[in-house]
Image: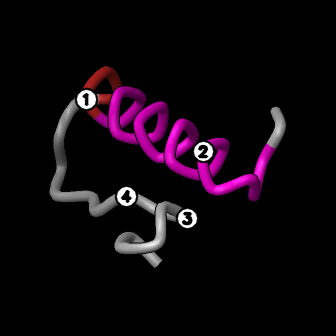
Amino acid sequence: MSDEGYAVPYYGQSKENLAKLHQANKQILIAKGLSDV
């Protein structure tokens, strides 16, 4: 799921770092036309 942009790996990092990873995935999904939010 991480490779497709639907999830991010979690290894105990900060919420700020996770938010950045989720934002990057969101942009990937938008570019693929899989999300418009």
Mark 2 vs mark 4: give the one in front.
Answer: 2
Amino acid at circle 3: Tyr
- Compare marks 1 and 4 and give the one earlier in the sequence: 4
Q: CA distance from mark 1 to mark 4?
A: 10 Å
Decide: few, some or many residues near mark 3? Use Cα within 10 Å; few <14, some 14-19, many ≥20: few
Q: Is residue 23 left or right of residue 30?
A: left
Q: Is residue 11 left or right of residue 26?
A: left
- Compare marks 2 and 4 and give the one earlier in the sequence: 4
- Residue labelled with disc 4: 8
Q: In the displayed orientation, state which residue is furthest to the top.
A: 16
SS class, disc 1: helix
- Compare marks 3 and 2 and give the one earlier in the sequence: 3
SS class, disc 4: loop
Say which mark, if any, is on residue 6.
3
SS class, disc 2: helix
Decide: few, some or many residues near mark 2? Use Cα within 10 Å; few <14, some 14-19, many ≥20: few
Mark 3 vs mark 1: give the one in front.
Answer: 3
Residue 3 location in percent, x, y?
35, 73
Instruction: Quarter of the image for the C terminus: give it.
Output: top right
Q: Is residue 26 magenta?
A: yes
Q: In the displayed orientation, state which residue is furthest to the right.
A: 36
Say which mark, if any, is on residue 31.
2
The residue located at (55%, 64%) in the rendering is: 6
- What range of the chain is rendered magenta? 18-35
Amino acid at circle 1: Asn
Residue 23 location in percent, x, y?
48, 31
Say which mark, if any, is on residue 17.
1
Amino acid at circle 4: Val
Mark 2 vs mark 1: give the one in front.
Answer: 2
The residue located at (48%, 61%) in the rendering is: 5
Q: Is residue 33 magenta?
A: yes
Amino acid at circle 2: Ala
